Image: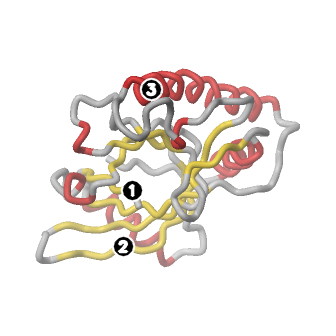
Amino acid sequence: MLYRGANLSDDLIAQYVQLVRSSDQRGSFQAFTSSSRNRAKAEQFGNVLFVLRVNYAYTTDLSQLSEYPDEEEELIHPGVCFTIDGVRYDPVKNKHEIHLTLTHNVDDDRANPVTRLYNGFCRAASAILLPVMDGLNAARPGPSAGGDHRTSRMTNGGFYRDRSGALREDPTGTLADDCYRRAQQAPRYDLD
């Protein structure tokens, strides 16, 4: 699970509530989006807590690069799709919880040149971030020295989180291609 605290207007919260009731409960992240694996940290921010269940999604663990490693920051890549599972209000915390499921779909749309360009951008961003993190892992003392399974070697694809939360490699980029197509069709929503 990932979490993100945000300040949303009452109108935007109401839009999420309406989307839960509609047949079109999909959306996508259009930019790199910060989140945390630490719920308590995320709850410190904003009037809304996004609870993000990760199904197949490109994310990057930034905790070792952060000036605040205790926030356990996880970066969600642009183009990650989500479905809106529910919205509830917690009167004790005076905060709305918006539950999303992050996912990539497995249909392939490789013929689209825009998809190829976007997919290349995501792979390039991963190729820049992941070796830096591998270097940090190699320099870190302890059992993970020499590399970490979360930042394995980059090929011509990308990385995604499977249903169990484990980081997996997508060497063909198939998942990112489909998600980009879905992202272009999905409504766009701001998370803060």
**Mark 2 to mark 3: distance in Å?**
41 Å
What's under tag 1, amino acid-wise?
Leu
Image height check: is 99 above or below 171? below
Q: Taking 127 as reference, is 59 left or right?
A: left
Graded by Cα atoms within 10 Å as few (under 14), some (14 to 19) or many (20 or more), the crowding at tag 1 reads many
Residue at left offset 63%, top offset 31%: 153
Of tags 1 and 2, which is closer to the observer?
Answer: 1
The amino acid at mark 2 is Val
Residue under numbered circle 3? 138
Taking the spot 39% from the left edge, 56% from the top edge, the residue there is: 2
Cα distance, mark 3 to mark 1? 25 Å
Check contact, mark 2 vs mark 3: CB within 8 A. Answer: no
Q: Is residue 50 left or right of residue 10?
A: right
Q: Position of residue 171 (x, y in %)?
A: 75, 39
Residue 40: quarter of image:
bottom left
Is the residue under label 2 in contact with that under label 1 (CB below 8 Å)? no
Label number found at residue 87 = 2
| Label 2 SS | strand
- Image quarter (top left, top right, bottom left or bottom right) of the N terminus: bottom left
**Mark 3: amino acid:** Ala
Instruction: Say the numbered circle drawn on residue 184.
Output: none
Q: Decide which of tag 1 and tag 2 comes sooner along the chain.
A: 1
Disc 2 crowd, CA 10 A, few/some/many (<14, 14-19, 20+): many
**Residue 189 at x, y = what percent?**
45, 51
**Vertical order, 47 against 169 (above or below):** below
| Rendering colour mode | secondary structure
Q: Residue at x 71, y 30 (%)?
A: 155
Residue occupying the point 79% across, 39% down: 172
Q: Which residue is mark 1?
A: 2
> Residue 124, how many percent across, how many down?
62, 23
Closer to the eye: label 3 or 1 = 3
